[in-house]
Amino acid sequence: MPAIEANGLTKIFGRRPQRGVRMLKEGADREKLRREGLTAAVIDATFEVAPGEIFVVMGLSGSGKSTLIRTVNGLLEPTAGSISIDGQDVTHLSTAQLREVRRTKVSMVFQHFALLPHRTVGENAAYALALRGVSKADREQRADEALGMVGLKGWGGSMPSELSGGMRQRVGLARALAAGTDVLLMDEAFSALDPLIRKEMQDQLLELQAELGKTILFITHDLNEAMRLGDRIAMMRDGRIVQVGTAEQILNEPANDYVAQFVADVDRSRVLTASAVMERPVAVVGAETGPKAAHKLMRENQVPALLVTGRNRTVEGVVWEEAVADAVKRGVDRLPVSTEIVRVTPDTPLVELFADAASSRAPLVVVDEQGRLQGVIPRVTLLSALSVPDAVEEVPDPNAVEDAPVAADGQSALDQAGAV
Ligand SMILES: Nc1ncnc2c1ncn2[C@@H]1O[C@H](COP(=O)(O)OP(=O)(O)O)[C@@H](O)[C@H]1O
Ligand SMILES: [Mg+2]
C-alpha cells in the first residue's frame, strides 16, 4: 500500500473554485482561469509515494509545490481529487480527525522554521509531543533522542538565540522526528541555508532515512538537491506534474522539452551514480575454474580478461589473457588471479570514478556492501554516460571524450576489456 497517494488532486484558489474545475475539464488553460480571478495552483496531480521512499517535488517558484504539500497535510482542502495517507482517505476530514492524522501519521518541516524564542531547544523539539499531552519525562527523552539524530546532542538546554540558522533548522527536523510519524513532509526545508550547511543537512537526511526508513515528501526548487535526495522526482510546471521518475530517467528520458531544458545544465557526473551506468558483467568465472577452461572461455567470448568470483559472487579479482595462457603452458592448475581491480559501491557518483578509471587497467567493479558483484563499468561507458542525450542537444559535444582522463598507457586493454 502506498504511504501517500494523490489522485487527480486539484486546488483552485478564488471565488467559486468548482467553476474552475469545470473550466479545466472543458479544456481551459491556467491563463483563462486567471482572467476569471481563479488561480489553478495544482491541476490533476496523480502520484504514489511508497513507504520509505524520498519523493521530491521539484519546480520553479509558483509552480504549485507548497499548495500540493499543504493539501497532503490537510492544511488546504482540495478542490477536486483525493489524498490518502497509509490507505486512509484524508481528503475531507473534520478538524478533529485531521488533528489525529497529524498526531499519528504526518509531520511537516517548513522552510522558515519558527522556534519559540522563550523555550529551550529541547522544549521546542518536544513541542508536538506537548500538544499531544505526552508526559514531561517521556517527551524530554524523545526530544533528546531526536536532537541526537540531527547532530544536536547536548543542546537541549540552550535557547534558540544561541543557535546558528543551520542548527535551528535541525531543531525543526528534530521536532518532526520526535513526533514519531512515519511520513515527513518537508517544504523547501533546506532552501534558506548556506550551500555548505545545506549539503550537510542533505547528507544527514539521507543518513536518517537509511536508518529510520521514513517516507519523505520533499519539496525543492533546486534541481541538484532534488537529484541528490530523491528516490524519485516529480517535475511540476504551472500546477501540473509533467514527469515522475528517477534522477536518471529524468536526465536521460526527459518527458518533454521543458524538462529537457531544465536538466540540460545539470552536472551529470555528480548526479549519476555507478549503479546508473554499470553494465551486466558477462565474462565471469568462479574461482575454482581451471586455467584451460578459462582460456577457452576468453577465446570464445573474445575478451582479454575475466572477473573471478568466489562464494556468493564476491569478487576476488581478474585474470588476464596473457597470464592465463602462461598458466596453461606451464600446466598450473589454479587461475593466476590478479587482485588489482578497483571496487566501487553502487551509490558512488561518477565524478569520483574518473581517477579510479584512469588508474585501473580493468573496468571498475561495482560491489555491494558484502563485496558481491553487481556490475562493471568499462571506461567507455563512463564517458558516454556523461554526454547529454541527443533529444536535448542537437550536436553531441565532441570534446566530451577528449577532456576525460586517459590512463597512463593510453587506450590499452581497458577499452577492449569493455566486454568484461
Ligand atoms: N492562499 C492562496 N490564495 C491564493 N493564491 C494562492 C494561495 N497560495 C498560493 N497561491 C497561488 O498558487 C500558485 C502556486 O503557489 P505555491 O503553491 O506557493 O507555489 P510554489 O510553492 O511552487 O512556489 C501561485 O500562483 C500562488 O500565487
Ligand atoms: Mg513554496
Image: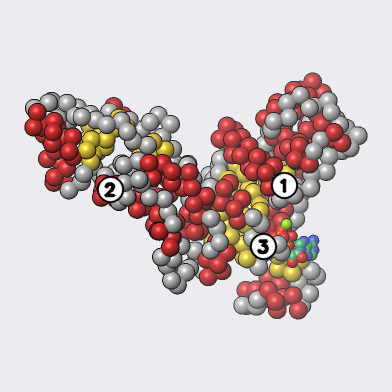
Distance from disc 3 to disc 1, alpha carbons, whole Å, reads 19 Å
On residue 412, the disc is: 2
Q: Is residue 313 left or right of residue 59?
A: left
Q: In the rendered structure, which amino acid carries the disc numbered 1?
A: Asp
Where is residue 51, by image quadrant?
top right
> Under tag 1, what secondary structure?
loop
Distance from disc 3 to disc 2, alpha carbons, whole Å, reads 46 Å
Q: Is residue 331 left or right of residue 80?
A: left
Where is the C terminus found, in terms of image quarters? top left
> Does mark 3 have its CB less than 8 Å from ligand 1?
yes
Q: Position of residue 55 (x, y in %)?
A: 58, 49
> Which residue is at the front of the view, 32 or 25?
32
Characterize the local packing of mark 1: few (<14), some (14-19) or many (20 or more) Cα atoms within 10 angstroms: few
Q: Residue at image x 75%, y 55%?
A: 76
Q: Position of residue 365 (x, y in %)?
A: 35, 39
Of callouts 3 and 1, the N-terminal one: 3
In the picture as drawn, the residue positioned furthest to the front comes out as 408
Query: Residue under circle 1?
Result: 194
Characterize the local packing of mark 2: few (<14), some (14-19) or many (20 or more) Cα atoms within 10 angstroms: few
Query: Residue under circle 3?
Result: 60
Of callouts 2 and 1, the N-terminal one: 1
Q: In the rendered structure, which amino acid carries the disc numbered 3?
A: Leu
Where is residue 148, by image quadrant?
top right
Q: Position of residue 244 (x, y in %)?
A: 53, 58
Up-down relation of residue 160 to residue 242 (above or below): above
Q: Is residue 336 left or right of residue 184?
A: left
Q: How is the image coloured?
A: secondary structure
> Which residue is at the front of the view, 87 or 369?
369
Up-down relation of residue 27 to residue 12 (above or below): below
